[in-house]
Structure formats: structure tokens, C-alpha cells
Image (spheres, rainbow, N blue to C red):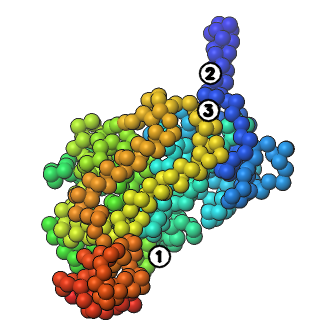
Amino acid sequence: MNKYLILTLCLLFACIMAYAQRADNYPPNNKTITIGSTNLPIVWVEVNGAMILKTEYITAHMKIIHNGSGNLNYGDTVAHPGQTIDYEGYIALRYRGNSSFNHSRKPYLFRPLDKPLEDGGEKKKVKILGMGKDNKWALLAPYSDRSMVRVPLSFDISRPWMEYAPQCRFCELYLDGIYYGVYILTEVVSKGKHRLNLSDPGEEGDDLTGGYIMEVDRNDGNVYVSKYYPRTSTGAILAGYNIYFQYSSPDYEDMSQAQLDYINRQIDLMEGALNSSNYMNPETGYRKYIDVENFIDYQIAMELGHNVDAYRLSGKLFKRRDSEDPRFKMVVWDMDLAYGMPYYYGAWRTENWSYEMNDTLLAQANIYLVPFWWYKLNKDPSYTAALKARWAQYRRSNLRLDRLMAEIDSLASIVTSHGAETRNDQAWPRWGVYVWPNNYVPTSYADAIAFLKQWLTDRIAWMDGQLGFDPDSRERGDVNGDYQVTINDVTVLINYLLTSDATGVYLDAADCDLNGDVAISDVTALINFLLQGYWEAS
């Protein structure tokens, strides 16, 4: 080959590699933004120009400044020495995400290290920003969600119900000295003392039965394929469309054949019970294999957000040892494309169910469908009755509309009160500009929050109608209408019986013994409830 041609090719290859190195770390549009002061923790990550990869970790250095709640953090560490360093050390870093990876700003996974990977660095557990010690963390990049609150809102909503919901914190990120904007530093769904506190599985007996984390998701090569096909909204079997289970913990390559055989068999048993003609039987049906209350809570979280990925992607299942609890449970994750965000698959609408999404997915040639379980569960009258009761319970507590609006305002205030949202917008300007997969294109941060609030209000109204909840009704025993049942309700009830003054008294809730009138027997029933924690049969 001509030496000049070889030289030209070498130069071309060098230019391509140099460009790839620069482009791979995807800097923001505006690289001149700096932080004066902020209420958010400041995260510095240094890779010294190295390419960050999607499938392999590289060594990076991380430093987090956080001077504590209520105190400001300063970007100029020379002018402001002595700030509190929350964490400083080596990390293993890589990109993460599927659809979120397609955006200009990328999300990351990182694992703290005792020394660089090149020197044999091992992962170590650390406490970060008040969250429990662990060695698996993520930096999520809210890009299409211009409110930036959808993920923390979902975690906060589900935390009172679920056994585990990830903790997360807003922060501002510098990468190699360039300001990258507002990120969400979060726990990931993993095994650990402060997360899913699961035992490592053994090789036999009870040890073999737990704990495992599986995930309904894409076919990444090392998957277990369900023996049962998904269904349409009318129950028709969609032969040829597979449901895939990924192995999350232990990792596939770390599992013995006995462990693989065991957890695959448990999935078969669970799905076989749900597929059987006798699946509603309380003794022999699906209730042996799933925690029904947990599945209901998961469904409420998915449907409240009308999550476009609900059930079919990032559907995280875990199982403890049989001696602790033999049933599968689920964890809420991957809620960035929720609450009216996407334009596709009807997810922007407020008046249909995500668990019936397969018809729409098929019409748009998507092969990752909702498992048949959700169709079968929602055809069981006992399951739907429990779902309606659970919805009513939450609608009177943390899903009250005023509480949800206050939660959104609180989260929004965190990113706006000291300019983080403004800096983020300066680095990544996109107000009034379409960003995939937006259904609604907000023109300002206030507009993004207003849209979220209105969409959620409309969604809840539709779900109230479908699940038979009257938002003006009061819980049994909530005599004073404050959405709680306490000793104060006894006082109000007694005062009503003594004076017949019904001011501030909810008489439908005051009929505590459900006999059709309000009398001294209702006081007795209410006191018994407060003492026992449950209503006696009436």
C-alpha cells in the first residue's frame, strides 16, 4: 500500500479517535456556566479526558461538597475553603440507560472504589448525602422531563406503601471542570442492608430459595424466557411475543446452575398459577406466589403516573428465602417517562390503563409487551376489590390532591430557590423546543410544573371514577373530616350527640357501626377501633 495513503489513513483514524473522545462525554451546549452558590450538593467528577463507556467501567475521581441542610455550597473552593466534603475518592464510572441514553445529556452508574481499577481497585460501600452505605449508585439526567421532579415524586409517593423505594437527592454536576447541570444522585434497586436487605442465595435447602432480584425487561442475551405469552386487552393470547426476565442479583455470570434452575422454576410456578383456570382460588392460585398487596401498590404507582414503561420494562421483582417470605414482590423504578410525558403509546392520555397497553404497543410494532399477569389479576373480583379499597385508603392520605400538589411544589422549590434550574437551562437551553418524547413542549419551568399538576389532577379524577372513589367522602370514623381517625373524632362525635350541632361533623363517617344512624354505639365502635387498630364485624 502507498506510504502516503497509509499516512493519510493513520491521520484520518487519529482525527476520528480524537473526535470520538471529545464527543463521547457529550458536553452541554454552553460550557461557560459556573456555580456561585447553591442549595444543592456539588458533585465533581474527573476522568481527565478519558472516554466514558456504556458497557465497561472506567476509573474516575469524585468529590461531593455538601455543607448540610439549610446551608449553601460554593463552587469556588479557593474563595470558600473548609467546606464539608461528603465523599471524596475513586469511583468506577460508566453510562447507563436505554431511552434516556439517547438524549444529549447522559445518565451514569458509579461504584466507589478503594483505589483505581488499574491498580486492582475493589468496590467499597460508602454513605452518600445521608443515604445508607452501599456500592451501587446512579446519576440520573433529567432531560426530557424539564420539571426534573418526576423520578423523586414517584419514589416519594410510593415510599409509604412499598417495602423499599430508592432514596435520591438533587445535585449539580461538573465533569472535567465543565458544568453539566442538575442531576439526581440516587440509590439503585439492589441488594444491601439499606436497600433490599436480602440474603445471598446458597446451594441447597432454604438457603437456595433467596434472595434474588429479577427484572422484566429487554432481551440482553442472558435472560429467562417466560413460558407464557402476553395478552391483548380482551384476553387474546399473543403467541410469538416473548416476555424476558433479566438476572439482576446475583448477576447471571455469578449464579450456579442450582440457583438458575431454582429461580427459573419459581417464575414458572408463579406464572403457571396465574395462567391456570383456577387461578383465583385463594389457597391454590396465584396468592401463594405473589404478595398481592405489594402488587396492588405497584400497580397504583404505575397507573397513577401512566408510565409508558410500566410492567414491561424495568419491572423489578425480588424474592426472599422461603423461611422469610416465599412470595415475589415488586419495586418502583424507571418513572422518568410518566405523568403525561411521552407522546407515544397513548401514555400522554389520562383516561386509559397502562396494563391494557399491549394493543397500542402492537399497533406501533413494539415487541416488549406487558406480561399476561396484569390482565389476569385485573379480571379477579377479589383483586379489584382490594385495589379499589387500597386506592381509597391512599386517596385519603398521601394521594390527596392537596398533598400531591404540595409535594410537587416542594421538589420544584429545591431546584429553583437558589438558581440551579436557571443554570441547568443555561447549560442545556431548550424551553419551547421539542425534546423526544415530549407530548407537551413547555415554554418555561413554571409552565412545565403547571402542566404536570394539571395532568395529575385529570388523571386522578379519571382513576377515582374507574375505582369508585368519591373525593368528597370521608373514611369511616373520620368524624371531623381532617382525613385522620384519632381521639379528636371521638370528642367531636360525643359533642354532636350531646348538642345535636352538626357543624363540622361528617355524619356519613360518624356512623361507625354501620347500622344506619348515629348514636352512642358509634362512640363505642370508634373507641374500639382506636384501641384495636381494626373495625369489628358489624
Q: Judge left or right: residue 456 versus residue 377.
A: right
Residue corresponding to mark 2: 16
Pointer 3: residues within 10 angstroms few (<14), some, or many (20+)? some
Q: Is residue 195 above or below residue 14?
A: below
The residue under the point 64% across, 16% down is 12
User: Closer to the N terminus: mark 3 or mark 1?
Assistant: 1
Residue 174 appears at what percent x and percent y? 69, 41
Classify 135 as above or below 50.
below
Real-space Cα distance between discs 2 and 1?
A: 52 Å
Picture residue at 22% right of the left edge, 58% below the top: 466
Q: Amino acid at mark 1?
A: Asp
Measuring from the top left, give residue 507's x and y in whole percent.
26, 77
The quadrant the N terminus occupies is top right
Q: CB atoms at circles 2 and 1 under 8 Å apart?
A: no
Q: Secondary structure at mark 3?
A: helix
The numbered disc on residue 426 is 3
Q: Residues within 10 Å of mark 1 (few under 14, many from 20)?
A: some
- Residue sitting at x 57%, y 50%: 413
Q: What residue would you read off at disc 1?
A: 207
Instruction: Report the mark closest to the observer, 3 or 1.
Output: 3
